[in-house]
Image (spheres, rainbow, N blue to C red):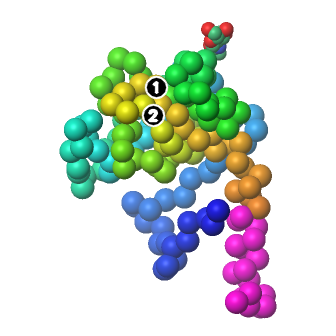
Amino acid sequence: PNPLLLKPKARINKNVQLISIPRSMERVTVGTKCEVAGWGWTSVQGQMTNVMRQVQLKVQNGSICQQLFKNYQPQSMICVGDDSSKKAPYKGDSGGPLICKQKAHGIVSHGRERHLFPEVFTRIFYFAPWIHEQLRKFSLQELPDSPSSD
Ligand SMILES: *[C@@H]1O[C@H](CO)[C@@H](O)[C@H](O)[C@H]1NC(C)=O
């Protein structure tokens, strides 16, 4: 798969910021509070919004997701949600970051139709070697004197 490419270079400002991915010692533990945001549906009936919404969710014990999602992989996924909350990522929020302790730990992935709890996020740490490899490739391409690869 190709990484996401932006046409113009991103400009860092108040609304566009960098975020780090976790190091090995920073795996999120059950109960960690995280933030997730997006422009996805604001109801299970499909209400759209153009205002970004944000919610705090807790990292859950993976065994909860293992019971409900037959393809759940604890190494590469994080089980997230708040069973007492009526707010959660939904359709249109996929791809958004799960931010725990100032680091991007997860990516909104999937849930069950019409259910808000629990939900499965991609575990970014598992893909860190691939991410670093892509960053290395792209930073090499951007060296001013490097030969063009077209
Ligand atoms: C997760 O749940 C399993 C099964 O109920 C339990 O054995 C385990 O200790 C739990 N782990 C954590 C970190 O709470």
Q: Is residue 24 above or below residue 6?
A: above
Judged left or right of residue 117, residue 60 is right
Q: Residue at x 36, y 49 (%)?
A: 92
Foreground of the two, 70 or 29:
70
Contact between marks 2 and 1 (CB within 8 A): the answer is: yes
On whether residue 23 falls in the magenta region, the answer is no
Q: Secondary structure at mark 1?
A: loop
Q: How many marks?
A: 2
| Residue 80 image offset from top left, x and y in percent | 50, 29
Report which quarter residue 91 is drawn in. Answer: top left
Report which quarter residue 61 is drawn in. Answer: top right
Q: Residue at x 24, y 55 (%)?
A: 50
Q: Is residue 133 above or below residue 138?
A: above
Tell me the quadrant of the picture where the N terminus can be found.
Answer: bottom right
The residues colored magenta run: 134-150
Are there few (<14), some (14-19), or many (20+) residues within 10 Å of tag 1?
A: many
